[in-house]
Amino acid sequence: MALEARGRRFCKVTHTENGRTLTRRIHTMMVQATDGRVHHIEGKSLPDSISLYSGVPHSGAHLAEVLLSPKDAKAAPLLPAPAGWLSKRDAFFVVLGIFFYKLIGLLAEGAALALS
């Protein structure tokens, strides 16, 4: 359950690194699940506190794990769904593909002329 002050819900984050400790409040969390979905957590869905520890790096010794209940958290897709048949991103890649196809053709023609 999130903490509350002045009518706003927040989560207390304590970060300890090499003996120095910082404490901050966060009002919103974005967590990406292994399937690519991004969970937006705020308000009552926030945990009461998060503790992070870091120190002298040792191979394989550090671990961070985020556990949440995806049924309680709102999820948004990593990439937004296209509005129509062809998105701007897809059109850009089509134009880029045609450009590289023509460029490779010109380079192959130039190499064939140079070798003959």
Image (spheres, rainbow, N blue to C red):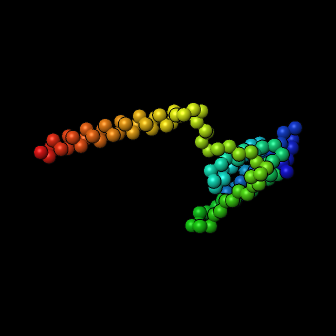
The answer to whether 12 appears left or right of 76 in the picture is: right
The answer to whether 19 appears left or right of 87 in the picture is: right
Q: Quadrant of the C terminus?
A: top left
Q: Nearer the viewer, residue 9 or 17?
A: 9
The answer to whether 87 appears left or right of 71 in the picture is: left
- Is residue 92 visible to the viewer in this orientation of the structure? yes
- Residue furthest out toward the front: 85
What residue sits 46% from the left and 34% below the top? Answer: 92
**Location of residue 20 in the rendering, given as x and y in whole percent from the top left corner:** 70, 55
What residue sits 59% from the left and 33% below the top? Answer: 83
**Location of residue 5 in the rendering, given as x and y in whole percent from the top left corner:** 87, 41
- Is residue 12 visible to the viewer in this orientation of the structure? no
**Location of residue 101 in the rendering, given as x and y in whole percent from the top left corner:** 33, 40
Count how many numbered circles sit on residues in the image: 0
**11 relative to 63, above or below:** above
What residue sits 81% from the left and 48% below the top? Answer: 45
What residue sits 68% from the left and 43% below the top? Answer: 76
**Location of residue 1 in the rendering, given as x and y in whole percent from the top left corner:** 85, 51
Quarter of the rendering containing residue 26: top right
Quarter of the rendering containing residue 105: top left
Q: Nearer the viewer, residue 100 or 29?
A: 100
